[in-house]
Amino acid sequence: MKNIIITGGAGFIGSHVVREFVKKLPETTIINLDALTYAGNLENLKDIESEPNYVFEKADITKPEELRKVFEKYHPDAVVHLAAESHVDRSITDPNAFINTNVIGTANLLNLCREFWTLNPDHTHGRFPDEPRKNLFYHVSTDEVYGALGATGFFTEETPYDPQSPYSASKASSDHFVRAYGNTYGLPFVVSNCSNNYGPNHFPEKLIPLCIHNILEEKPLPIYGDGKYTRDWLFVIDHARAIFQIFHEARTGETYNIGGWNEWQNIDLVKELIRQVDEKTGKPSGYSEKLITFVKDRPGHDKRYAIDASKLNRDLGWKPSVTFEEGLSRTIDWFLENKEWLDNVTSGAYQDYYRKQYH
Ligand code: NAD
Ligand code: DAU
């Protein structure tokens, strides 16, 4: 493939995916298409921004005319779609932003892919499942589409969809649209549904970076409800590796769950963060535990997520390469070494700078 568009490449996971593709596919132009919302930060890609096979295009997926310009300029062979509103709490206060970006934005991309690939006689494509693949729409999705688990059990690729928040409903809807375009128009696609990511570039509205930031600033660590909610955590670079592998090796029309086999109750996770951050910053053991503050619960809070990623392991041999202890340690080190990044994204000044550059 000559040209691959990665949407949302300036965000947390997208920046790691862009880096993975740019480094591993030197003959392919990787187009990072991103609107640079509050969550998008080109500083995340500083180390690769001058690579000859990397380009950035500022475009908003909710605006079909902006997307069309990028499609006409590059005639992409594939789209890896990560651009989204991604924070559950924001979806509770402003669901429309999630409907617009995650549902309508995804449909806008699908319409262009259909036009450029399946309706274009000059641009033959592999209809799934058996023809050789010329094009691919890869939808990066979440385990939250499956709803919430009780104390036991795992989400598999067969688990029925049961989204509970406006965020997960918007992602479930976009997953359905991707599969519907595959079924109806023969659009070649794959979908992956991943558990909670953590690592460098994580925006400090999410639990792990928020707590690292607040421990460093000696601010309260807000724990929703009783803190016994459970998430499965995966180091972001392992997610990016999985996406690269699925992109190349999965059969068209496939779905893969991606997870870390690494469940933590929030309260235990925050205590582990305190332990590691205190140790690294020379504080006495348990010093920052006084910052733990139980606050009002998230409405509709999903009790537990746990991914069964054995299909991905069985079919493609993927497994996480980084243990949780090592991943957390690398993440904390990154935040300690990138205080300026943290100050910039929390102040918004840096984003304003980039926004002006590309207007
Ligand atoms: P993020 O919020 O850090 O980044 C989102 C990116 O999308 C930003 O760069 C933003 O500027 C861009 N964007 C938002 N709206 C846009 C629009 N209208 N047009 C163009 N670009 C736009 O998100 P993330 O945590 O990196 O998540 C990336 C994807 O992975 C999302 O689709 C999310 O649903 C999915 N996902 C995330 C996790 C996780 O733990 N964070 C887990 C599983 C799946
Ligand atoms: O499971 C995958 C999903 O993981 C992704 O699809 C989402 O994009 C991503 O944001 C993440 O969603 P969560 O809601 O699980 O992540 P968050 O970091 O917001 O919350 C993790 C857990 O911590 C959750 O149970 C809520 C709780 N929490 C969160 C925050 C921000 C707190 O107790 N206090 C907080 O301040």
Image: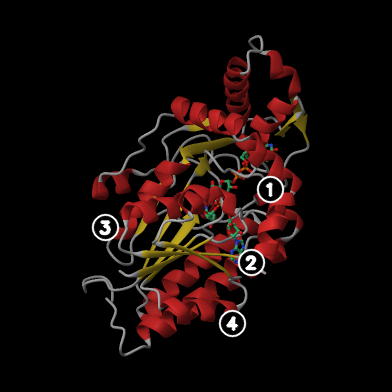
Q: Earlier in the sequence, mark 2 or mark 4?
A: 4
Comparing 20 with 162, the one in front is: 20
Q: Earlier in the sequence, mark 4 or mark 1?
A: 4
Q: Are marks 2 and 4 in contact (CB under 8 Å)?
A: no
Residue plotted at (53% across, 80% down): 69
Residue 97 lies in quadrant: bottom right
Front label number (2 vs 3) = 2
Residue plotted at (37% across, 47% down): 241
Q: Which residue is mark 1?
A: 300
Residue plotted at (66% across, 44% down): 301
Q: Which residue is mark 2?
A: 358
Q: Is residue 103 visible?
A: yes
> Gap in Å between the C-alphas at discs 2 and 4?
17 Å
Give the number of the disc on residue 93.
none
Give SS at disc 4: helix
Q: Is residue 156 visible?
A: no
Residue plotted at (62% across, 73% down): 62
Name the amino acid, label 2: Tyr
- Classify mark 2: residues with Cα within 10 Å, few (<14), some (14-19) or many (20+): few
> Gap in Å between the C-alphas at discs 3 and 1?
37 Å
Q: Which residue is mark 4?
A: 65
Front label number (2 vs 4) = 2
Give SS at disc 1: loop
> Gap in Å between the C-alphas at discs 1 and 2?
38 Å
Q: Are marks 3 and 4 in contact (CB under 8 Å)?
A: no
Q: Earlier in the sequence, mark 2 or mark 3?
A: 3
> Gap in Å between the C-alphas at discs 2 and 3?
35 Å
- Classify mark 4: residues with Cα within 10 Å, few (<14), some (14-19) or many (20+): few
Give the number of the disc on residue 249.
3
Q: Earlier in the sequence, mark 3 or mark 1?
A: 3
Front label number (1 vs 2) = 2
